[in-house]
């Protein structure tokens, strides 16, 4: 019986990443099992343990909080405010790209931190000869956000983005199943929860809760000034924690 490792991306229902260490018979390629943190915790141990041996949730929570729903809502409102949204009856040939671009820019702010933005941009201008204040001020941070918003338009359409954020807001592993502590207590396999000490989108206290309520859970902290994006930018720390955990439960 071989072992496989699967990564569930941060666009899933959990709002974070879940790495699964799986049992794979006859060393065949692992099946594409749609486990995010939510579905993972609904499986009673007798059903999940033959397949999943361990898991590593990264920078996510057990439910979407009012804070995360509020951020999602401001992004949706940016899309709704674009006249081309037309109450969701958009023209595929002329979609509300302006609104989607702003929605992405809001997201880009929530993925980082005040310190991270200060270190990267400060009050620098892209053109020192331009005005230093007002709507025409060429702030480097403004240029960065506009670039990220435009780049995003080739990756998502507005309806998909609105619906995806709605689905993420529905994430709650305890919904109709009891208390959060009761639900997570059913997961008996080893779980290493990774949190980022500067994450303002999914604050560290949410990972602390998950690790506390999992019977065989442990918490490892990624130290970073990058906020939520630390799980992408601090790859050495992430890899070291995952490697140590997997080897200790091999």
Image (tube, grey):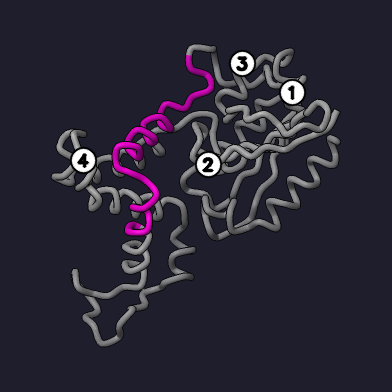
* Residue under label 3: 182
**Residue count near mark 2 (Cα–Cα under 10 Å), binned few <14, some 14–19, many ≥20:** some
**Mark nearer the N terminus (3 vs 2):** 2
- Determine whether the residue tagged by mark 4 lies in a helix, strand or loop: helix
Q: Which disc number belongs to residue 51?
A: 1
Residue 117, percent across and down?
44, 65
Q: Quadrant of the N terminus?
A: top right
Number of the front mark, 1 or 4? 1
Residue 243 is situated, as x and y percent measured from the top left of the image, at 78, 47
Quadrant for residue 207, please give it.
Answer: top right
Q: Which residues are magenta?
A: 149-175
Q: Label 1 crowding class (10 Å Cα cut-off): few <14, some 14-19, many 20+?
A: some
Name the N-terminal-most of marks 2 and 1. 2
Label 1 secondary element: loop
* Residue 5 in picture, x, y percent from top left: 72, 38
- Give the Cα distance between marks 1 and 4: 43 Å
């Amino acid at each position: 019986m071989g072992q496989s490792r699967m990564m569930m991306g941060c666009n899933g229902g959990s709002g974070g990443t879940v790495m699964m260490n799986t049992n794979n018979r006859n060393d065949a390629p692992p099946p594409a099992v749609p486990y995010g943190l939510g579905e993972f915790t609904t499986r009673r141990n007798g059903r999940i343990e033959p397949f999943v041996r361990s898991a590593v949730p990264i920078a996510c929570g057990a439910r979407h909080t009012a804070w995360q729903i509020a951020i999602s809502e401001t992004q949706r409102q940016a899309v709704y405010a674009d006249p081309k949204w037309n109450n969701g009856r958009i023209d595929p040939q002329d979609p509300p790209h302006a609104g989607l671009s702003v929605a992405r820019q809001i997201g880009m702010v929530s993925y980082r931190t005040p310190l991270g933005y200060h270190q990267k941009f400060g009050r620098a201008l892209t053109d020192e000869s331009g005005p230093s204040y007002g709507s025409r001020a060429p702030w480097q941070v403004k240029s960065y956000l506009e670039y990220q918003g435009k780049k995003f338009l080739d990756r998502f359409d507005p309806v998909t983005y609105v619906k995806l954020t709605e689905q993420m807001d529905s994430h709650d592993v305890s919904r109709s199943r009891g208390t959060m502590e009761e639900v997570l207590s059913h997961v008996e396999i080893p779980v290493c929860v990774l949190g980022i000490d500067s994450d303002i989108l999914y604050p560290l206290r949410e990972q602390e809760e998950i690790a506390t309520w999992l019977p065989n859970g442990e918490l490892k902290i990624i130290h970073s000034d990058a906020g939520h994006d630390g799980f992408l930018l601090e790859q050495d720390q992430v890899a070291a924690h995952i490697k140590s955990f997997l080897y200790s439960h091999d």
